[in-house]
Image (spheres, grey):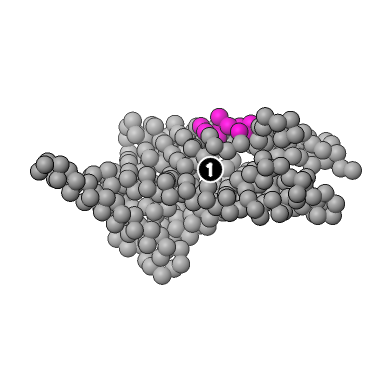
Amino acid sequence: EMTSSRTMTQDLASLSAVMAETSRILCAFGGKLFGVESEGKLRAPLFDGHTDLLVFALLSLGLFFANWSLRLAVEPVARMLLGKTSTKAKVQKFAQSALEMVFYGAFTVFGILVVPGQEWFWPSERWWSDYNSGKTMLISDALKAYYLLYAARYSQGIVSVLIEHKRKDFWEMQVHHVVTVALITVSYIYGWNRVGAVVMVLLDPADVPLHAAKMCKYIADARGGRVGKACQTAADVFFVIFMLLFAVMRLGLYPYVVWSAHIEAAAYFHFGRDANVCVVLLYLLLGLQVYWFALILKVAIRVVRSDGVVEDVRSDDEEEEEEVEKLEPKKNK
């Protein structure tokens, strides 16, 4: 009985520590976003008692329930925008894109407000110059919250993709999510959080106009007439913005980050297994960006050659014939 009581006491103490740490970093995060709190003291990750791991698990669970609860709230709006003839699958896909746009947009704002203000943000040599001294292990509470929330978002995404309508790039998305979570985990554990935070800031913005384009396209297909034409024009504009952001952020700036991690970092410390793992994961992410941009270019070329518009960049794959969306251009009438 004494052993059982002692175990229960330890569990309650651990739960209390997790809740306290979650509250602390989220408060600092909120203060940073609204400009009412400074960075505060830098701290090392809390590995004892698996505190940070449990905080991450708690945040993942919270974001999962928030994601699907909000989708249920968005679906009636989607049904109204798409009209009475819209199918259940279309309504769900519209809600899915709406929530993706919100999440990507929110984390874009979070990253802009939290990361560039770090003293090590630029030049890139600052990502590595303090590595041997151990200073790169230290992290502010606001940045820690952003880091763990980002990992939690992609962790719940791994599960959500299994529940959602299957995409044509289902496996590529799963690989992307798994690699992202792995990169965040390894970089957090081994003090590569500076370059990790920079990667986070670069990868999110392009997906905001992508999902805006999807939503406009769904409405255009469902409504027709003037509303449909206006939404199709908006979809085309958002698609162009998406292409430009993708090219600049993911194929322009992100490769520089990979170069810095692979080449520049080697001038400051000897690469061990942890560094090699991070570099490999960064290259895997880069490979996915190149693959996706190749698909985007194919879509763009088809549009130009046909003088038409495109269904979707990352189409969904439905069982029902009427729900199958192909990467083929439609002729303007």
- Residue 263 in view: no
Q: Nearer the viewer, residue 142 or 195?
A: 142
Q: Would residue 111 be found to the left or right of residue 128 on screen? A: right
Query: Residue 188, how many percent across, how many down?
Result: 36, 43
* Nearer the observer, 118 or 319: 319
Q: In the image, 225: left or right of 50?
A: right
- For the C terminus, give its image quadrant: top right
Look at 49% across and 51% down and name the residue there. 66
- Count the marks: how many? 1
Q: Is residue 95 above or below residue 33?
A: above
Residue located beneath label 1 in the image: 254
Which residue is at a point 53% across and 55% down the rendered structure image? 106
**Label 1 environment density (alpha carbons within 10 Å; few <14, some 14–19, many ≥20):** many
- Residue 323 image offset from top left, x and y in percent: 71, 35
Looking at the rendering, the stretch of residues picked out in magenta corresponds to 166-175
Kindly state the secondary structure of the residue where label 1 is placed.
helix
The amino acid on which the numbered mark 1 sits, given as a three-letter code, is Tyr
* Residue ranking furthest to the right: 333
Quadrant showing the N terminus = top left
Q: Secondary structure of the magenta portion, mostly?
A: helix
The spot of residue 52 in percent (x, y) is: 31, 47
Residue 79 at least partly seen:
yes
